[in-house]
Image (tube, helix red, strand yellow):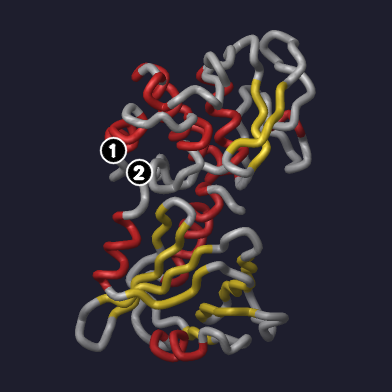
Amino acid sequence: MPEGHTLHRAADEQRPHFAGARPAVSSRQGRFAEGAASLDGTLCRDVEAFGKHLLYPFEGADGEARHLHIHLGLFGRIRTHEGELPEPRGLVRVRIAVPGYAVDVSGPTACHVLDGAERARLLARLGPDPLRADAEPAKAWAKIRKSRTAIGTLLMDQSVVAGIGNIYRAEFLWLARVHPKLPGKDLPKGKWNAIWADAVRWMRIGVETGMIITTEGPTPKSRRSRRRFNIYKRAECPRCGTPTTMFMLAARKVYCCEVCAPPPPES
């Protein structure tokens, strides 16, 4: 599943083409035909990312915005076309197109039109997004400091923090020297501040580069480079040389160093 930086990068790339335009909206696959027809040729006000969600506010006939909502989930994909636009290929759920530029979305978990109230309910379910200027990290801390749930699970809970996925989870906890199984209620406030600051810094770099990078030094040239990560899928801790520990948490593999961040009692 794409982490939040991927959606913010997509929004940043698409905004200059769609915001203020009247794009053609279609559904080759047909599963979104009615929704596409309701948006086709109407004014797109913006392209926004909230965590792992993309929202395109379109102007409605009554002046109220209607929001195309896309969540890629595990298997969704966005393809971008520039110049002479090809015919949509495969099971394209929705194509958004202006002359010389189009995006095709295939296999999303969610692709539907929301009214203003539905958009508000969606956003109310999300925690603060480190990539948004309007984020309020105190809201996440208010949930974390009262929870007995492991911090490694809480960071993957989109209602606590929006946009962090499995790789960033492992990296931010390693950087802060926090064991993934530490209960949220036992996390010091200073550690939370460090995790949030790292999320803001490194996820912004992810937007800029199009890659998850959490290591200092020259930017790796390849997405295949393991030098992009400190602990994720690494054989040993780069800080102390201890073999990495891996276990399942929140249904995903998490990697940590149990010397730099000892496990909590009875973990």
* Circle 1 Cα neighbour tier, 10 Å, few/some/many (<14 / 14–19 / ≥20): few
Q: Which residue is mark 2?
A: 128
Residue 218 seen in the figure: no
Horizontal and vertical percent for residue 48?
39, 60
Above or below, 137 against 59 in this view is above
Horizontal and vertical percent for residue 211?
63, 43
Query: For the point 40% across and 70% down, which residue is it?
Result: 56
Horizontal and vertical percent for residue 79?
64, 68
Q: How many marks?
A: 2
* Direction from residue 130 to residue 137 in the image, left or right: left
Name the quadrant containing residue 234. Answer: top right
Give the secondary structure at mark 1: helix
Q: Earlier in the sequence, mark 1 or mark 2?
A: 2
Amino acid type of the residue tagged 1 in the rendering: Lys
Q: Between marks 1 and 2, how big is the CA–CA gap? A: 7 Å
**Label pair 1/2, CB-CB below 8 angstroms:** yes
Above or below, 102 against 252 in this view is below
Query: For the point 41% across and 88% down, which residue is it?
Result: 41
Amino acid type of the residue tagged 2 in the rendering: Pro
Above or below, 160 against 10 in this view is above
Q: Which residue is mark 1?
A: 139
